[in-house]
Amino acid sequence: MASSNPVKVSVLGATVFHIPFIQSLPHLFSLHSILERSATAEHSEARKRYGNDINVVTTFEQVINDPEVDCVVISTPNATHYPFAKAVLQAGKSVIIEKPLVPTSTEADELIALASSHSPPLIIATYQNRRYDSDFLTVKKLVDQGVFGDIVEFETRFDRWRPALKGGGTWKEQTQPAQGIVYDLGSHLIDQVLTLFGTPDRIYSHIYNARKLGPADFDDAFFAEYYYDSGARGSQLPLVVTIRASPLSALASQLRYAIKGTKGSFLKHGLDVQEDQLRLNPPLSTSDRAFGVEPESIHGVLTTVDSSNHLKEERIVAEKGNYMGWYEGVGAALQARDPSKLYVTPQQARETIRMVELMYESSRSGKVIHVKTS
């Protein structure tokens, strides 16, 4: 039933990327509790970071059996997303799931059907927050304005200089379902590409362990090409989208986007600042004027072609990053119990997982995969 009351939320797992926004939107959300299994009466990392008045629980059962909880944020290892989300939905609660949604498209279909079986439907919101990165918002604005003409090449990448493993037993470097760079950073890049251009006609991918560290099947790098043979966004020219990530890129400023079209091009280096701002202790307030503002030093360069075929370069001031916007949309959808209000729908998140599956199929077979309509 629709309600204007704040949605009572319980958070499982990593809290850095969610609680600041929940607390910044009191008209939409109320932080009910945080699950911290190792917490005691004397010590709690959650209370240490967010204050002693935070309600900390120590079991998942306390969360799903609490009638006050309306929605559960799942920010836990990828392999746990499906069983946790299924239990939450079966308990009659909506769910916010850190990307990737779930390991497989079949599991995504089951969760979507389960949420839809309730009346009104429960909400499944996938935290594809990088649709609200400053650089992507800037790129999307330029693409929507048509400044590139027909886009023929689009490259998007997340490279880092990380020659050694993080260590410390982090689950992200262990062999589990839905692990590796494609499910991690790759799911953001894929989601952005699908948002701009839709589903490709064909896919080729090579997924590998570039550093030869950790488990043999630990994927820390990938390269993929998405082929739009009949063009995209109304263009009749074929479009090739390149998606890649590597931990062995020793550059002071990493390339983020390279876009080429019949009327211009765009080069962008550097990363959105919001994640680093949230990791500060204490985190930078989401209401701070500097939150989400990209430094001028990494503004992208747009090159356009005039009527005399002369090239003109200009720095493009980046749009302000707005992870808050994702949470505002989800809060509205939760209060209304209306999935149509979601900017990132569960069906879109499911399509991202399907692309991941096809990329692994291509990498295993060494072949270009023809994408069938889902």
Image (cartoon, rainbow, N blue to C red):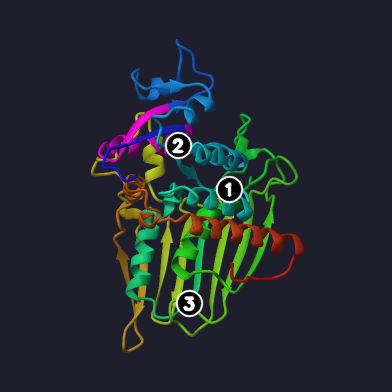
Residue stretch in magenta: 12-33
Mark 3 and mark 1 lie on one chain; the one further toward the N terminus is 1
Mark 1 or mark 2, which is nearer the start of the sequence?
A: 2
In the rendered structure, find residue 232 and report the number of the disc placed on it.
3
Image location (x, y in percent) of residue 40:
49, 13
Residue 5 colored in magenta in the image: no
Q: Nearer the viewer, mark 2 or mark 1?
A: 2
Residue nearest the viewer, comparing 229 with 209? 229
- Rendered view: 148 above or below 291: below
Q: Looking at the picture, which amino acid does disc 1 mark?
A: Val
The answer to whether 212 appears left or right of 244 in the picture is right
The residue depicted at 37 percent of the width and 45 percent of the height is 274
> SS at mark 3?
loop
Mark toward the start of the polypeptide (2 vs 3): 2
Q: Which numbered circle lies on residue 72?
A: 2
Q: Is residue 72 above or below residue 328?
A: above
Residue under the image location 50 percent in, 58 percent down: 347
* Distance between mark 2 and mark 1 Cα atoms: 15 Å
